[in-house]
Structure formats: structure tokens, C-alpha cells
Amino acid sequence: MKFQMDVIFKSFESRSLKKALEKANKITGTHFSKSNPCAFGLQKNIKRWTLLRSPHVHKKSREQFEMVTYKAVLRTSWQSENEMKVFLLALKNLEIYGVQIS
């Protein structure tokens, strides 16, 4: 029986996302020879909003902000459930700053 798993990485910086994917690929390549990871990026999410600088009179004076979220997916397939659990434990113990793994 083959197990397939998608791991989603989210970050506000593209560099930290690339580093996290490289580390995850390195784990799958060194410890698990049978799995073949496939990593691909998803569409970035941009949220923009505008705030008034002054609460009273100056309506033309505004500040604009944007928040960009980058996403990537690592798709792997495993031969056994134990290998998958060990991989998830190794991902959990990685020191990846600024990246959410789900």
C-alpha cells in the first residue's frame, strides 16, 4: 500500500520558503531513498489596505500597506506508514524560522 502526503509551506518571505523546501528535500533524499518528492509553488496571496493618516481633517493623506504570503507544496509518496511518521517528526524538529508547515 502506498501513502501519499502533501505538506504545505507558508511564509511572508520567499527566501525562507525556498530554504525550508531545500531542507525538506534534503531530509527525504538522505533518509528515505524510495520516496520521490515533488515540490511546486502555489500562487502568492496579496492583501492590500489603506488607512487614513489623520483621523480628523486630511482625507487625502493616506498610507497604503500590503501583505504578501507565499505558498509551496511538497508532495511525497511513502511505502509504509512508519516512514511517513518519521518524516513528519523530522520536519517538526527542523529549525525553520518564518515558515508555517501544515
Image (cartoon, grey):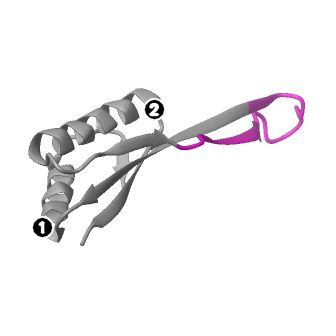
Q: Position of residue 87 (x, y in %)?
A: 17, 55
Q: Position of residue 23 (x, y in %)?
A: 23, 36
Q: Is residue 28 visible?
A: yes
Q: Nearer the viewer, mark 2 or mark 1?
A: 1
Q: Which amino acid lies under the numbered mark 1 shown in the image of this protein?
A: Asn
Q: Which quadrant would residue 99 be assigned to in this image? A: top left
- The residue at the far bottom in this view is 1
Question: Which residue is the site of mark 2?
Answer: 13
Q: Is residue 59 left or right of residue 64?
A: right
Disc 1 crowd, CA 10 A, few/some/many (<14, 14-19, 20+) = few
Q: Name the residue rendered at 65%, 36% in the picture.
A: 66
Question: Which residue is the site of mark 1?
Answer: 82
* Residue 43 magenta: yes
Q: Which quadrant would residue 11 be assigned to in this image? A: top left
Q: Secondary structure at mark 1?
A: helix
Q: Is residue 36 left or right of residue 94?
A: right
Distance from the alpha carbon under mark 2 to that under mark 1: 32 Å
Q: Position of residue 64 (x, y in %)?
A: 73, 32
In-front residue for pair 59/80: 80
Q: Position of residue 37 (x, y in %)?
A: 31, 45
In-front residue for pair 10/3: 3
Q: Is residue 45 left or right of residue 30?
A: right
Q: Is residue 102 visible?
A: no
Residue numbers of the magenta segment: 42-63
The quarter of the image holding the C terminus is bottom left
Q: Name the residue rendered at 40%, 27% in the picture.
A: 15
